[in-house]
Image (cartoon, rainbow, N blue to C red):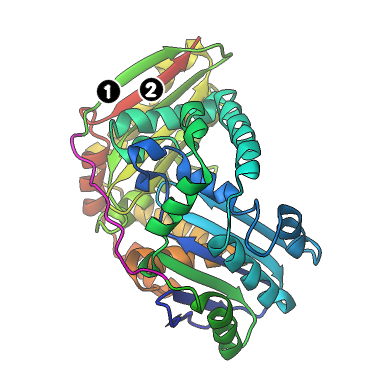
């Protein structure tokens, strides 16, 4: 694969483009702002702004926004996370300009009409209620709130019914003005287009916006205390999340924990938790582990759904897997196999043009560089059993592990 190309527009917005010889292309704007960047009275505002992008601009009404790419078989979408907001599109490569212009219009020219804002509050309230109807999703939101108590990163992305009621158009405009700075925006692209044409299109549709260059300042989380909480719910199975605070994106131990997470409960069906708890004992349909790093902290967690009568046994088996990784270093064969598996998974992820676009944007935002696949593979190959043993003992420490259980 040709190396990605990085350049900067005249207004300071950075661009990363991966040439791909495919008919379908992908591009999007990454704003390095999410729910953790909200002030206390803005809970849910970043997500609300994402919805508001599609409700009208200086140039278009909602119908024209939704029809612009759909009319040529393309797709436009957006999402909000703890530390980022994306507006992105997938389309036939001949529609690059149509996509760039539309993304730029809804990102920078959204007017957030009061009439549409009122209607969208009901839509988001339904979204919040759908989470409440899904304990396997809601439990993660509540676990985060306990883990990062009294800190913005622990607040839910969607906000609350009370916070939604407060929002007005002026709040969204103010939030955009404060967070949409040149250094906090990346345009990412993956597709077949001549570089000079791409540069010209981006200067035409994005480079003309005057953006401040003030940095986004975040308050670091401190004072983590382990907890164990149980809540009764009107449900038919027990849901459990176990976890702890973990390493940030820039921590040198991040690759090691990523590998350990993959061994323990990653997406492959042969992960240790799945083989032991689901396949061997047959006491859980769904069990996995997740490592989610952020810019200055992270979360490691395990999720389990099971029958109430199997909860204690399930937890015992989870601790057994922790102990296996903390008591004894991986054998050379185990380490070799684990590395080959995660390298293969990383390579397969690069088969998706959309995934390439997202990875490029996030890498440039976080590290101000793009590592080649070869560099990523080398970082995996460099990991040693002793390093992994140290990480396992830091993260899987019983004294640091927290839990939240939904029971009936």
Residue at the (46%, 66%) spot, across then down: 361
The answer to which image quadrant residue 378 occupies is bottom left
| Residue at the left extreme of this rendering | 223
| Viewer-nearest residue: 196 or 165 | 165
User: Residue 273 placed where, x, y %?
Assistant: 45, 34
| Residues tagged 1 and 2 counted as in contact (Cβ below 8 A) | yes
Residue highlighted by disc 2 = 404
| Residue at the right extreme of this rendering | 71
Image quadrant in which the N terminus is located: bottom right
Residue highlighted by disc 1 = 227
Residue at the (41%, 46%) spot, across then down: 82
Magenta stretch: includes residue 159: no
- What is the span of residues highlighted in magenta in the rendered image? 211-223
CA neighbours of label 1 inside 10 A, class few (<14), some (14 to 19), many (20+): some
User: Residue 263 placed where, x, y %?
Assistant: 41, 45
Image check: 385 left or right of 154? left
User: Residue 403 placed where, x, y %?
Assistant: 34, 24
Q: Secondary structure at mark 1?
A: loop
């Amino acid at each position: 694969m040709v190396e990605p190309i990085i350049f900067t527009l005249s207004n300071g917005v950075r661009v990363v483009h991966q040439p791909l010889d495919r008919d379908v292309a992908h591009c999007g704007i990454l704003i390095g702002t999410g729910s953790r960047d909200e002030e206390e009275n803005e809970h849910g505002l970043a997500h609300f702004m994402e919805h508001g992008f599609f409700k009208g601009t200086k140039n278009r009404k909602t119908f024209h926004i939704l029809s612009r790419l759909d009319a040529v078989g393309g797709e436009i979408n957006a999402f909000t996370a703890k530390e980022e907001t994306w507006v992105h599109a997938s389309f036939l490569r001949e529609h690059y300009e149509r996509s760039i212009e539309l993304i730029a219009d809804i990102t920078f020219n959204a007017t957030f009409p009061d009439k549409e804002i009122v209607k969208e509050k009901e839509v988001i309230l339904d979204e919040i209620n759908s989470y409440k109807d899904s304990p396997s999703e809601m439990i993660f939101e509540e676990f985060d709130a306990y883990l990062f108590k009294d800190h913005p990163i622990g607040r839910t992305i969607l906000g609350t019914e009370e916070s939604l009621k407060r929002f007005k158009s002026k709040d969204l405009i103010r939030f955009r003005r404060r967070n949409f700075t040149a250094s906090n925006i990346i345009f990412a692209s993956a597709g077949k287009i001549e570089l000079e044409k791409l540069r010209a299109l981006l200067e035409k549709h994005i480079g003309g916006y005057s953006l401040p260059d003030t940095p986004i300042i975040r308050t670091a989380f401190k004072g983590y205390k382990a907890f164990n909480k149980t809540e009764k719910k009107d449900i038919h199975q027990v849901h459990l999340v176990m976890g702890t605070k973990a390493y940030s994106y820039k921590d040198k131990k991040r690759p090691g924990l990523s590998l350990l997470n993959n061994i323990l409960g990653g997406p492959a069906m042969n992960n240790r938790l799945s083989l032991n708890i689901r396949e061997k004992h047959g006491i859980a349909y769904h069990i996995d582990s997740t490592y989610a790093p952020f810019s200055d902290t992270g979360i490691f967690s395990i999720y389990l759904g099971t029958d109430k009568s199997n909860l204690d046994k399930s937890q015992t088996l989870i601790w057994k897997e922790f102990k296996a990784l903390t008591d004894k270093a991986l054998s050379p064969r185990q380490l070799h196999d684990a590395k080959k598996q995660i390298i293969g998974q990383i390579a397969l992820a690069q088969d998706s043009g959309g995934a390439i676009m997202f990875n490029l944007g996030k890498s440039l935002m976080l590290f101000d560089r793009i590592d080649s696949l070869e560099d990523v593979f080398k970082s995996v190959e460099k990991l040693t059993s002793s390093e992994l043993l140290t990480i396992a003992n830091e993260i899987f420490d019983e004294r640091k592990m927290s839990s939240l259980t939904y029971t009936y």
